[in-house]
Image (cartoon, grey):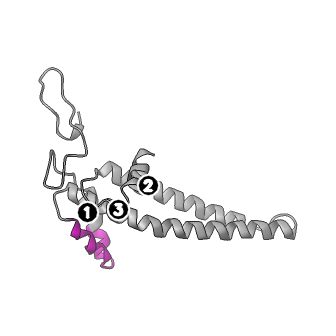
Amino acid sequence: MNYLRESWKKCFCYAGRASRKEYWMTFLWYIVSVIVAGILSVILRIPVGPLYVQDALAWVAYALIILITLYVIGSFLMFLALAVRRIHDIGSSGWWVLVGFIPFIGAIVIFVFTVIRGNIGDNKYGPDPIKPIVVPDSGMPLAGGQL
């Protein structure tokens, strides 16, 4: 949940880097929330009870569809900034995100950029978003905070 909160806080921040985990946890939350809200809006349209109950539930379903639409539109800006920061993590220019607007091929390229491991340590776009773990015996940091 922290990843989602941080992504929304940095909605207009295109500087810096984002880890794979930050990107994919935010993406997972986004997909699950849209699917759950969509299923709920369909369930609310199932005819049950008297007509006035069906009408009230239909209005709730329509309101939910409008909220989902606004959420998806608003999330576009958040994911644009998140994708730029994710591309920065692998050491590439954030302008590569524009490739994502090319049908089919763009989605594949962006997917590949988001699954590639980021640069270990600092790069020209900022510090490593994954803090290295220091092993007490050797005093040497492990790459990418992984044991």
Q: Are marks 1 and 3 in contact (CB under 8 Å)?
A: no
Q: Residue at the location (79% across, 71% down)?
A: 55
Label number found at residue 28: 2
Q: Residue at the location (17% across, 34% down)?
A: 142
Q: Place residue 46 in its image quadrant.
A: bottom right
Q: Number of callouts in the render? A: 3
* Residue at the spot of label 3: 12
Taking 21 as reference, is 39 above or below it?
A: below
Dot 3 or dot 2, earlier in sequence: 3
Instruction: Give residue 83's position: percent from left, percent from top.
Output: 30, 62
Dot 1 or dot 3, earlier in sequence: 3
Q: Is residue 27 magenta?
A: no
Q: Place residue 10 in its image quadrant.
A: bottom left
Q: Residues within 10 Å of mark 3 (few under 14, many from 20)?
A: some
* Residue at the spot of label 1: 112
Residue type highlighted by circle 2: Leu
Instruction: Give residue 98's position: percent from left, percent from top.
Output: 27, 74
Dot 2 or dot 1, earlier in sequence: 2
Instruction: Give residue 102's position: percent from left, percent from top.
Output: 30, 79
Taking 13 as reference, is 63 above or below it?
A: below
Residue type highlighted by circle 3: Phe
Report the magenta residues as a range.
Answer: 94-109
Which corner quadrant holds the C terminus? Answer: top left
Between marks 1 and 3 in the image, the one whose residue lies nearer the viewer: 3
* SS for dot 3: loop
Left or right? Give the position of 74 relative to 54.
left
> What is the CA distance from the residue labelled 2 to the residue labelled 1?
17 Å
Q: Is residue 97 magenta?
A: yes
> What is the CA distance from the residue labelled 1 to the residue labelled 3?
23 Å
Q: Residue at the location (33% across, 59% down)?
A: 82
> What is the CA distance from the residue labelled 3 to the residue labelled 2?
20 Å
